[in-house]
Image: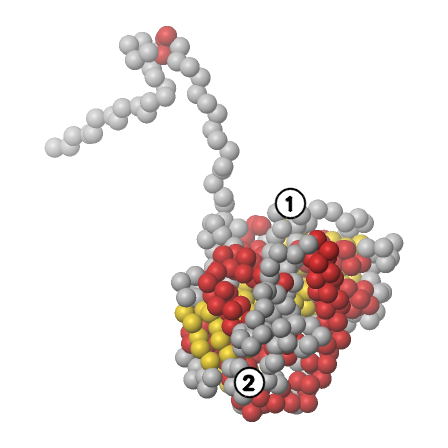
Amino acid sequence: MPREIVTGNHAAGLALSMAGEANRTALGTAAGIYPITPQTEIVERVAAFPFTKGRIVPVESEHSAMAVTMGASLAGARAFTASSSNGLAYMVENIMVTGFYRLPVVMVAVNRTLGPPWNIWADQGDTLMLRDFPWIQLYAQDNQQVADLTLLAFRLAEDPRILLPVLVSMDAFIVSHTQMETELPTQAQVDAYLPPLDLPHRMRTDAPTTLGGLVWPAATVSLRKEIHEAFQRVPTVFQECRAAFRDVFGREVADAVETYRTRDAETVLVASATVATTAREVIRARRAVGERVGLVTMRMFRPFPADALVEACAGATRVGVLDRDYAAGMGGVWAQDVRAALQGRRDDLLVQGYLTGIGGGDVTVERVEEVLADLGQRELPGDPVWIGLDDAAPVPATVPAPARPPLAPSDSPDSSTPDLRRPPSPEPAEVRS
């Protein structure tokens, strides 16, 4: 495969386009697209791709972008799109519908802070807000993983045992706009990896059906249970997709959970995406001086790989979870799921959540060191710990000023008592000759 220096957005756009082109011997490809910073370069690259059988539809909003993508998938095409932040929020109704229709749509999301106040920097809160929808969620750590996981997402989504949409996420600017050396696939390799799509429940002109109509409660329960069973099969099928990737491309694609020096670790950090890159450097340095610390990098969020996490933390007594997101009133989303996965497994395990990089703040080596310092002295878990608040700009007070008392008679303008509520009159300017 050729190696090129490309951005994460370039890698995503190319992978989406090649996956769509690989379906040219079947019903082709289609996508609804709408720009939003910092995702725009992805859909620009897709729109410029010379598809043999396919159509890219620029629309007027993100809601419509997913509607077009959903319609294309219902017709049996290989469908995909991309978005970010408030664009995902505007798209959310159709994101939900796509999942419940069991459509194998792939969407690349560039993680960006939800506003207002408006902020275009990295924060995972936009995709994590979709955590209860029937979408598989994968989090890429670098440009190579963006390209690889996007291709794997199509094979995973379209597997007849799964038939669920997949979301592939990357950090805004840190990955989306940063260039790094990346092995890019050839079209022949993608053709070999992604078989032509034959969606079993696609809409057919020769057998008209109604999809998504009104059903009784029992039918809804049955359909939800089918989705749950499909999610339970994801870990096994994911590994099969990885094996097929190795056969075609000659190298490994990133695993759902990656461990680093956890076998004998007493303290384990849990992180995702680019935060894990920094955390790994800290763990390496701590190990060099004999500290028994380790790192778990979470690449799959839905379904949550609880068994793999439990195994990775088997020997630990303290676990610190680094969240680049914030769930109002609760703390970090990853920390909630990590705590739930480990609950009841061990009585001697302390799990503490840390909020860092919120709103795109830098997650530096020093910040990870702060996490380890706090975690090392803890006897009990507590509220989420905010790391890096001293880097934040001061926020104007939002508490209203107290009301002024009513005027007393002596405060009238005619009184000899000066009116202290008014600024003093300026002194006459000094006249110089």
Label 2 crowding class (10 Å Cα cut-off): few <14, some 14-19, many 20+?
A: some
Percent position of residue 87, x then y: 48, 60
Residue for point 60% across, 59% down: 213
Percent position of residue 124, x then y: 58, 60
Q: Is residue 79 left or right of residue 229?
A: left
Q: Amino acid at mark 2?
A: Ala
Where does label 2 land, which residue?
Answer: 26
Where does label 1 land, which residue?
Answer: 329
User: Against 88, is 428 above or below?
Assistant: above
Q: Is residue 351 left or right of residue 14?
A: right
Sequence-earlier tag: 2 or 1: 2
Distance between the alpha carbons at the discs numbered 2 and 1: 48 Å
Residue for point 40% across, 62% down: 60
Residue 291 seen: no
Residue for point 58% across, 74% down: 207
**294 or 209, which is in the foreground?**
209
Residue for point 53% across, 82% down: 27
**346 or 168, which is in the foreground?**
168
